[in-house]
Amino acid sequence: MLQLSRPYSIYIACLVSIISSFSLCFFAYHHEGQSFWDGMLMCCNSHSWEQVIKVLVILLVVLCILFIVYFVDIVQKTKQFLSTLTPYKVRGFFSQEIETFQKKYSIQINIINDKRPVAFTYGFVYPQIIISTGLIQLLDSNEIEAVLEHEYYHYRNKDPFKLSLYKCLARLFFFLPITEKILKRYVTQKELAADAFATEQVGLKPIASALYKLMTYSSPLSFSTAHFQNSDLKDVRIEFLLTGTHTRASLSKREWAVSILHLIFITVIAGCVSFLWQNISSMILLLKI
């Protein structure tokens, strides 16, 4: 049995409502002896475009509300995750590499007592960098500095906040074929830019060796954090470090065309919803008369 994807199922349901709208409108405005097209012309002329604009505004407000809901959900997940790390925060831990780095940029590096090698940046308005004792034990001094420089790029550019915005937009426009690829492109661009910054500061070898050692350790973080060991991008990052270039996720003309058609169709649906509402109201008035 043919299975339709979620967006297309919604569109088919909306198409049925559009046909029903025009049918109701035709019967409401059709008179005896009048041709089909004359009836449909009267139907279309009866529609108020101000109503369409109102529906589009309502749709925009709904999208804004959903965006806020998604963003709050990401914030809550981040807070819950960080609350689990609070008992493991280490105070008074001495590391020459971290001390030197903190003096260099006048920032505070948070250390957690965790055997897993973890390094990430979190926070929207005031970002913070966290690394684990497991990472400090696994990497040598140059590699630790490379990881810290990578995270400092995310810290300086407030990338956790920007990544969260992009992820919210991706959830909001999940039905567009280009959405996932645009998100992946942005995340890739940010990670490669952070690698390039770290390479400028400490050289290619430390960042490459740190990435190699951490490749087998996948990070559990999937929300508003920018983390060093992004396993989804390891091949692209290795390619970038070796060649200075990378293969970008291509967006075909077909994907752009389908995405634009999706947006046009949604606009048409919004117009038809207002169209249907106005016609039902007119029919109710006619029945009362």
Image (tube, rainbow, N blue to C red):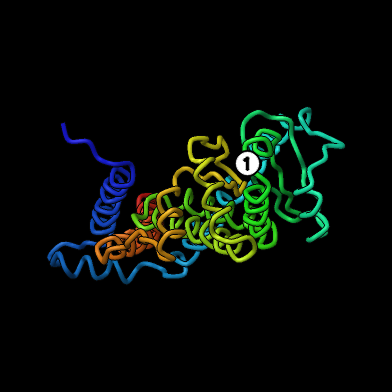
203 over 115 or under it: above or below: below
Q: Position of residue 260 (x, y in %)?
A: 33, 65
Judging depth in this view, the residue of 14 and 84 nearest the camera is: 84
The residue at the far right in this view is 92
Residue 180 lies left or right of residue 32; in this view the side is right
Residue 164 lies left or right of residue 136; in this view the side is left
Specify the quadrant that holds the N terminus. top left
225 over 261 or under it: above or below: above
Residue 41 lies left or right of residue 88; in this view the side is left
The residue located at (75%, 49%) in the rendering is 97
Specify the quadrant that holds the C terminus. bottom left
Judging depth in this view, the residue of 22 and 83 nearest the camera is: 83
Question: Crowding at label 1, few (<14), some or many (≥20) Cα neighbours within 10 Å?
Answer: some
Q: How many marks?
A: 1
Residue 264 showing in the rendered view: yes
Q: Position of residue 3 (x, y in %)?
A: 22, 36
The residue located at (24%, 70%) in the rendering is 41
Judging depth in this view, the residue of 279 and 62 nearest the camera is: 62
Q: Position of residue 138 (x, y in %)?
A: 62, 36
Which amino acid type is marked by label 1? Leu
5 over 101 or under it: above or below: above
Q: Position of residue 89 (x, y in %)?
A: 79, 33
Quarter location, residue 120? top right
Judging depth in this view, the residue of 194 and 61 nearest the camera is: 194
Residue 285 showing in the rendered view: no
Q: Which residue is mark 1?
A: 139
Q: Secondary structure at mark 1?
A: loop
The residue located at (41%, 65%) in the rendering is 245
